Amino acid sequence: MNEAGHGGEGSTEPAPLDLMVELRALCELAPRVSAAEGDSGSATQPGPPTRFTSGRGHGARPALQVDCEWRDDAGASRSLAVAKVRVGPWERRYVLGETEEDEEGHELARELLDLVGAVIFGDLEVEEFVGGGATAWVMKVRGPAGEWRRCHRGGAGVWAWGLRWFGARWPGARIRRWSVGAARPEGANARWARTRAALPWAPWAGAAGFVGGGAAAEPQPIPVDGELDLHRFAPKDVKRLMHAYIDECLARGITELRVVHGKGKGHMRRTVHATLDKHPAVASYRLAGHGRGGWGATLVELTPATAD
């Protein structure tokens, strides 16, 4: 286990995290546009920081911005309730558990820290193309072997499809890269050493050593073709996986999905339907009919994404 109590090859038990300390330490590895806002030493806004920034982006914006909402716990302590991570035009919102003992909250916290670390260490970047009154972007994540993978994309404006398809070759297009690329401490057991993790909804997992460890299998990409088979996933992972999959389908113009959850006792089906009930992009859903999986699959209609 490394000096921060996380990551490193061979670690088996996750140690407790102090999210404020970890976020501050990661963000201070690279130059910032501005200091963290709302520091405990501030006379106008006491308490933990409400915003962390790192790296120099474009214009007055940092490459990485993390907005935090803290909640009061027992005594004088505070814990992170909500975090919104922005890398250029892309953002991801994390709602953490209600208590320190919340297992899902711990997992989300580690996933969040790996996302921040991936940007800071240059293992995640967002390419943004701007031109003709439209914008388009694609996220790229570097794998353990150094290979780059495209994993998320989106855009806004009438000509966003052209920018997504042609990139910098689109007439008049300008390219912006949002990343940091700070030096990573050397040594296999150094703080923030990369680990191997397999979270299909979070391809950056393990980039800073918070998720995974040991010899976990290489993540296998999930085809984004409108059919999601959940047989190899645990019910506790379904919500995050489905949210990420729906977002990616919408970015690619896919609005009809088939989610295969199996029959069994119905636990996975109920988890899937509860997730669909709360997703704002889901227009309707129903159990598949004969020949398409029956009650072992659910057909979903999404509301097409609109250009801003």
Image (tube, grey):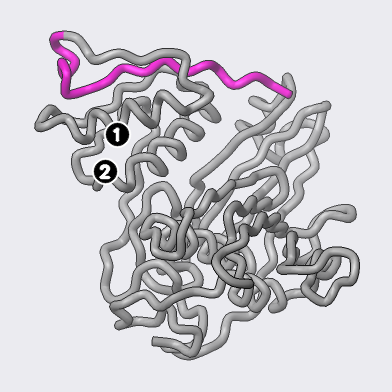
Image height of 222 relative to 98, above or below: above
Left or right of 178, for residue 281: left
Expressed as whole percent of the image width and height from the top left, the position of residue 30 reads 73, 75
Q: Read off the residue under disc 1.
A: 271
Q: Which amino acid does label 1 sit on?
A: Thr
Q: Read off the residue under disc 2.
A: 235
Q: Residues within 10 Å of mark 1 (few under 14, many from 20)?
A: some
Determine contact: label 1, label 2, CB under 8 Å: yes
Q: Which amino acid does label 2 sit on?
A: Pro
Q: Does the magenta stretch include residue 292?
A: yes
- Residue at 49%, 62% in the rendered image: 109
Image height of 149 relative to 25, above or below: above
The span picked out in magenta is 290-308
- 143 and 304: which one is in front? 304
Element at badge 1? helix
- For the C terminus, the image quarter is top right
Expressed as whole percent of the image width and height from the top left, the position of residue 234 reads 24, 47
- 31 and 127: which one is in front? 31
- Residue at 65%, 78% in the rendered image: 25
Q: Does the magenta stretch include residue 151?
A: no
The answer to whether residue 147 shows anywhere in this view is: no
Where on the picture, by quarter, is residue 306?
A: top right
